[in-house]
Amino acid sequence: MEEILNELVNLDSKITDISSKRDKDLKDLENKLNDELEEIKKSINTEILNESKLIYESIIKEGKDRVKEIEETTEKEIEDLEMKYNKIYYDASRDVFAQLFNMR
């Protein structure tokens, strides 16, 4: 009978040890999973930040290219208007002088 009681005490001790080890292992695994989850979150956030930066830079480049295009178009239009103005001014001046000299 004593032997059975000793076996039961030993078995209970082993069960307690196994249970404690299992709890510790589960806690360690939970900590490891939480650490991995944090790393995944950081990685995703970094990827999102990098993609956002690329999109932002692309939008800025498109905007700058469009501004440059508008400036070039506007400059060309101004040059064309100046040429037309100069032609009209030259033709008008020539006509005025021609009329003045023809009057005499």
Image (cartoon, helix red, strand yellow):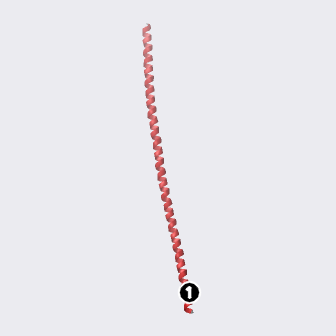
Determine the residue positioned at 43% across, 27% down.
80
Determine the residue positioned at 55% across, 89% down.
6
Using residue 14 as the reference point, say whether residue 83 is left or right of it. left
- Amino acid, disc 1: Val
Residue 77 screen position, x and y as percent: 45, 29
Using residue 53 as the reference point, say whether residue 12 is left or right of it. right
Instruction: Give the total number of marks visible in the rendering.
Output: 1
Residue 14 screen position, x and y as percent: 53, 82
| Corner quadrant of residue 100 | top left
Give above or below for 74 relative to 6. above
Determine the residue positioned at 45% across, 37% down.
68
Residue 12 screen position, x and y as percent: 56, 84
Using residue 103 as the reference point, say whether residue 27 is left or right of it. right
Q: The C terminus appears in which quarter of the rendering?
A: top left
Q: Residue furthest bottom?
A: 1
Which residue position holds label 1?
9
Q: Residues within 10 Å of mark 1 (few under 14, many from 20)?
A: few
For label 1, the SS is helix
Give above or below for 23 relative to 64. below
Residue 16 screen position, x and y as percent: 55, 80
Q: The N terminus appears in which quarter of the rendering?
A: bottom right
